[in-house]
């Protein structure tokens, strides 16, 4: 999360949104590994497995939705071009805050 906050601080919202997503993504991978002993190799696989775990773990709540929505930040940062390929700074900051809640929630599940 430090990277996401740092790049948001220098007003690079696409990179900040991407870093926020990746922080949450890695937290999801950690939970998956702890629960089933292996981690899918793709973003789609991690999202799908995390959603499956959420069905059996009510404390996960809305976290799978954030993970899939935040993937859009990574997509914009990595693949989009042109004038529409932007992430507004307030959205990136909101994603950073949501990613922190995501990570905190996963941390509680892993305790």
Image (cartoon, rainbow, N blue to C red):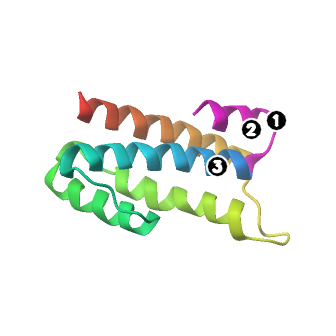
Nearer to us in this view, 73 or 29? 29
* Tag 1–tag 2 contact (CB < 8 Å): yes
Cα–Cα span, label 1 and label 3: 13 Å
Q: Answer with left or right where residue 10 lies relative to residue 30.
A: right
Q: Report helix, strand or loop for mark 1.
A: loop
Please, which residue is most extreme toward the left here?
A: 56
Label 1 sits on residue: 10
Q: Residue at x 37, y 67 (%)?
A: 45
Is 77 in the magenta? no
Question: Which residue is situated farthest in the right direction here?
Answer: 83
Q: Quadrant of residue 82?
A: bottom right
Residue 61 lies, in percent from the top left, at 27, 48
Distance (Cα) linking label 1 and label 2? 5 Å
Q: Over which residues does the magenta segment extend?
A: 1-13
The reply to whether the magenta stretch includes residue 10 is yes
The structure residue drawn at horizontal position 80% and vertical position 71%, both measured from the top left corner, is 81
The residue indicated by pointer 3 is 17
Q: Closer to the N terminus: mark 1 or mark 3? A: 1
């Amino acid at each position: 999360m430090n990277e996401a906050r740092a790049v948001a601080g220098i007003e690079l919202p696409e990179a900040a949104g991407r870093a926020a997503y990746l922080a949450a993504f890695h937290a999801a991978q950690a939970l998956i590994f702890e629960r089933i002993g292996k981690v899918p190799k793709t973003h789609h696989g991690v999202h799908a497995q995390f959603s499956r775990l959420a069905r059996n773990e009510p404390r996960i709540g809305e976290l799978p939705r954030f993970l899939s929505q935040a993937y859009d930040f990574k997509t914009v940062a990595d693949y989009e071009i042109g004038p529409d390929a932007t992430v507004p700074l307030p959205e990136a900051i909101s994603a950073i805050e949501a990613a922190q809640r995501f990570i905190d929630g996963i941390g509680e599940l892993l305790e």
